[in-house]
């Protein structure tokens, strides 16, 4: 079986995202704990456990099923694409505004300049790849 088919099958199960959320919570909470902030680490872990529980147990909610990725169809794919584009627009706009704010206060714009550059390069690369594939 091809890697893409295996990945699609594993990542589209209803248990993948809750499990990934738990692993992410343990990793990030553990990093905070190791960094000397035990209470914040435990709070982060508890927050991620709560999110994982909502994702695992919220099977009747169409929104949660859409976030998990199980039962996708053309409608969900179109909504997901529009939501991803809107979220990207908000993040990139926020980066530009934050960079301008930093410059207006006499600072060098770090880390917003780097984030903006990454976003721009990723966008151009995505355009090139998608144009070549179409």
Image (cartoon, helix red, strand yellow):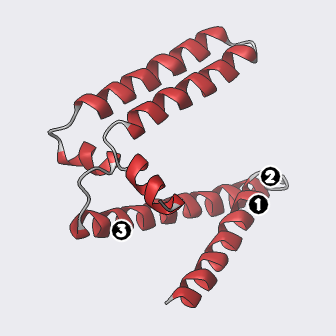
Who's the residue at 53% across and 28% down the image? Answer: 23
The residue nearer to you, when weighing 109 against 133, is 133
Q: Which quadrant holds residue 95?
A: bottom right
Q: Residue furthest left?
A: 60
| Residue with the mark numbered 3 | 82
The residue nearer to you, when weighing 70 against 67, is 70
The residue nearer to you, when weighing 47 against 60, is 60
Tell me whether circle 3 and circle 2 mark residues in contact (CB < 8 Å): no
Total tally of numbered discs in the picture = 3
| Residue with the mark numbered 1 | 113
Tell me whether circle 1 and circle 2 mark residues in contact (CB < 8 Å): yes
Of labels 3 and 2, the one closer to you: 3
Of labels 3 and 1, the one closer to you: 3
Q: Is residue 30 left or right of residue 72?
A: right
Q: Position of residue 108 (x, y in %)?
A: 85, 55
| Of the image marks 3 and 1, the number of the one nearer the N terminus | 3
| Residue with the mark numbered 2 | 110
Instruction: Name the secondary structure under disc 1.
Output: helix
Q: Is residue 63 left or right of residue 37?
A: left
Vertical relation: 134 (above or below) 76 = below
Q: Position of residue 30 (x, y in %)?
A: 65, 19
Vertical relation: 100 (above or below) 134 = above
Tell me whether circle 3 and circle 1 mark residues in contact (CB < 8 Å): no
Q: Position of residue 4 (x, y in %)?
A: 49, 62
Who's the residue at 84% across and 52% down the image? Answer: 107
Q: Position of residue 11 (x, y in %)?
A: 42, 48
Instruction: Name the secondary structure under disc 2.
Output: loop
Q: Residue furthest top?
A: 39
Q: Which quadrant holds residue 80?
A: bottom left
Mark number, residue 61: none
């Amino acid at each position: 079986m091809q890697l893409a088919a295996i990945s699609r099958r594993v990542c589209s199960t209803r248990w993948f995202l809750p499990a990934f959320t738990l692993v992410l919570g343990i990793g990030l909470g553990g990093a905070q704990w190791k960094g000397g902030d035990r209470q914040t680490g435990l709070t982060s872990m508890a927050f991620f456990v709560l999110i994982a529980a909502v994702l695992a147990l919220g099977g009747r909610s169409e929104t949660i099923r859409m976030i998990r990725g199980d039962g996708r169809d053309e409608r969900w794919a179109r909504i997901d694409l529009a939501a991803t584009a809107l979220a990207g627009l908000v993040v990139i706009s926020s980066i530009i505004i934050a960079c301008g704010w930093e410059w207006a206060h006499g600072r060098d714009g770090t880390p917003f300049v780097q984030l903006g550059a990454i976003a721009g390069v990723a966008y151009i690369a995505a355009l090139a790849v998608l144009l070549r594939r179409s």
